[in-house]
Image (cartoon, rainbow, N blue to C red):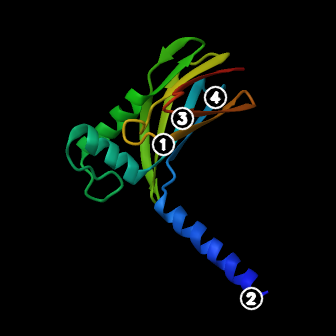
Amino acid sequence: MKKIGFALAFVVVLLLSSAWTHKFYVGIFQVNYASEKKMLQITTRIFVDDLNNALEKKHKKKFFIGEKNVAEADVASMKKYIADNFRVAVNGQPLALDFRSYEMENNVVICYFRITDVVSVKTLDITNKVLFDFVTEQQNIIQTNINGSKQNLLLTIDEPSGKLTF
């Protein structure tokens, strides 16, 4: 019985140590349609260290998103980076993201965007390459709620785009 307990403890320690050495790269993007406002409301959740590293790689300078000393230029670069890498087309029509604000929750930066003047949503074409230029293992989960219909996409470097029909 002691041997089984020791073996089980060893396996748990081994699994935990491998979990610490292998980072999980994922972003969550929520897209909701507010029909009464004729608006898509988009919330992004991205690990701040990954976002800072991607911006540093792209711009060859240090970024401080999520820190007290964040410069307006850093925030502007973040907004542009997300807008350049997260694209939405409604009913086949590409539409621009309107950045509203951002906040920090632990080590996650949460950005709020919207797309206005959306009369109806029959299809959503989404391309999401956020952080793909930083780490090839990145996965971006898209969760949608359009007129009460909930659908999801899992986008990767090999498949960065998807289409949903409502």
Mark 2 crowd level (few <14, some 14–19, many ≥20, 10 Å Cα): few
Lower sequence index among marks 2 and 1: 2
Q: Position of residue 53 (x, y in %)?
A: 32, 48
Q: Name the residue under label 4.
A: 33
The kind of residue on which mark 1 rests is: Glu
Q: Name the residue under label 1.
A: 137
Lower sequence index among marks 4 and 2: 2
Q: Which of marks 1 and 3 is in front?
A: 1
Lower sequence index among marks 1 and 3: 3
The kind of residue on which mark 2 rests is: Lys
Would you identify the image quadrant in which residue 78 lies?
Answer: top left
The kind of residue on which mark 4 rests is: Tyr
* Residue nearest the observer in this picture, 28 or 32: 28
Q: Position of residue 5 (x, y in %)?
A: 73, 82
Q: Are marks 2 and 3 in contact (CB under 8 Å)?
A: no
Q: Name the residue under label 3.
A: 42
- Calculate the distance from the C-alpha at mark 4 to the C-alpha at mark 1: 29 Å
Lower sequence index among marks 4 and 3: 4
**Position above or below: 138 against 118:** below
Q: In this view, does 85 lie to the left or right of 162?
A: left
**Residue occupying image coordinates x 63% and y 28%:** 33
Mark 1 crowd level (few <14, some 14–19, many ≥20, 10 Å Cα): some
Q: Position of residue 59 (x, y in %)?
A: 23, 39
Q: Residue furthest right?
A: 1
The kind of residue on which mark 3 rests is: Ile
- Calculate the distance from the C-alpha at mark 4 to the C-alpha at mark 2: 57 Å
Q: Mark 2 points at which residue?
A: 2
Q: Which of marks 2 and 1 is in front?
A: 2
